[in-house]
Amino acid sequence: MHHPPVPWPAAATSGTVLRLTGLGRPHVLSRFLVAEPVHPHWFSVRAAHRDLEFEPPVSFDSGIAALSGQWP
């Protein structure tokens, strides 16, 4: 697993310090919050189609085309 080089050790250190000192308050910089944006996310509408007969109003390809047209 790839971890961001600076935020990951900072998050791990802050979590350890808070745990060892017993401050018991939630810390803003957690290893989960650092790692979450760099992990790939895949979503499927198969269950919605199967259970609810849902059809997306915009196809994936046309959505990507419209989104990519927003940037130069």
Image (cartoon, rainbow, N blue to C red):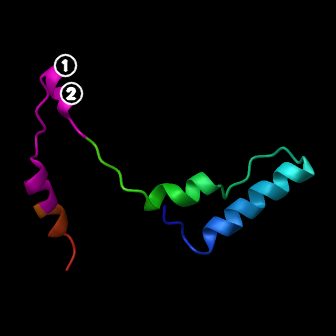
Q: Is residue 71 left or right of residue 38?
A: left
Measured along the vertical axis of the image, is residue 43 above or below residue 11? above
* Residue pointed to by mark 1: 51
Kindly indicate whether the residue at mark 1 contacts the one at mark 2 (C-beta within 8 angstroms): yes
Measured along the vertical axis of the image, is residue 68 above or below residue 60? below
Residue at the image point whose x is 15% and y is 59% from the top? 64
Q: Is residue 65 left or right of residue 28?
A: left
State which quadrant residue 4 falls in.
bottom right
Query: Type of residue at label 2?
Result: Ala
Query: Type of residue at label 1?
Result: Asp
* Residue pointed to by mark 2: 48
Q: Which residues are magenta?
A: 44-64
Q: Specify the quadrant that holds the C terminus.
A: bottom left
Measured as percent of width and height from the top left, residue 21 is found at 91, 52
For marks 2 and 1, give the CA distance. Answer: 5 Å
Measured as percent of width and height from the top left, residue 36 is found at 49, 54
State which quadrant residue 14 falls in.
bottom right
Q: Is residue 40 left or right of residue 22?
A: left
Measured along the vertical axis of the image, is residue 20 above or below residue 52? below
Residue at the image point whose x is 46% and y is 59% from the top? 37
Q: Secondary structure at mark 1?
A: helix
